[in-house]
Image: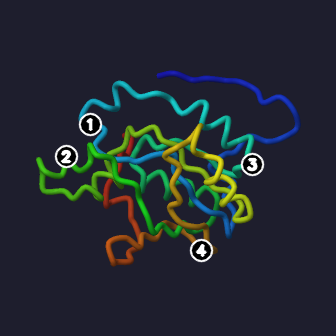
Amino acid sequence: AVTAFGFLPGRRQAPGRDRAQVGDQIFLTGPVGGSRKARHLRFAPRLAQGRWLFERGVRAMMDVSDGLALDLQRMARASKVRFQVRHVPVHADARRASKVDARSALDHALHDGEDHELIVTVAPRQAARLLREAADVCPGLTLLGEVQAGAGLVLELDGTRRTWQPSMGGWIHAS
């Protein structure tokens, strides 16, 4: 196990998983799924992207390590809101994995984990600017959906709407 401690100079608070607000837009720094094809062993931490996103005022941020859906649900729970997700960028490795097993590429994208992309939320008035400026530092930045009043994670994908539950997938650490 590794633990890192640090400090943030200045007066601004670091974005945490508990700071998403109703109306925020939800973004992801890149495509997910299929990381077990060994991508999880040779990833580049999204440090530059995290700093860039922080400088542009994102409110909430966390990495995707236990599966996108599970980590989205955790962030929504910590922020006491509901995340409404309408789009998930699927990695090519997820598509390859789906050809080997009976799971869809979307299922891999939602539940595989070890992607190490960043989930962030930002005020709606900053969302267009974020996408406009992302090309050089964060080219994979993708809008997933928005933060709403309520609780949990609602997925509107592939023409279906469902409330996501932890039993659907992701990595639950043994206690």
Mark 3 neighbour density, 10 Å: few (under 14) some (14–19) many (20 or more):
some
Mark 4 neighbour density, 10 Å: few (under 14) some (14–19) many (20 or more):
few
Identify the secondary structure beneath mark 1.
helix
What is the distance, in whole Å, between disc 2 and disc 3 at their CAs?
Answer: 36 Å
Mark 2 neighbour density, 10 Å: few (under 14) some (14–19) many (20 or more):
some
Residue at position x 37%, y 70% in the image: 157
| Amino acid type of the residue that numbered disc 3 sits on in the rendered structure | Gly
Residue that lies at the very extreme toward the right in this rendered image: 11
Q: Is residue 136 above or below residue 7?
A: below
Residue at position x 34%, y 77% in the image: 160
Residue 137 at x, y percent in the picture = 59, 37
Identify the secondary structure beneath mark 2.
helix
Q: Which residue is mark 3?
A: 57
Contact between marks 1 and 4 (CB within 8 A): the answer is: no
In the image: residue 41, left or right of residue 141? left
Q: Earlier in the sequence, mark 3 or mark 1?
A: 1
Identify the secondary structure beneath mark 3.
loop
Contact between marks 4 and 3 (CB within 8 A): the answer is: no
| Amino acid type of the residue that numbered disc 1 sits on in the rendered structure | Arg
What is the distance, in whole Å, between disc 2 and disc 4 at their CAs?
Answer: 34 Å
Q: Earlier in the sequence, mark 4 or mark 3?
A: 3
| Closest to the observer, 39 or 68 | 39
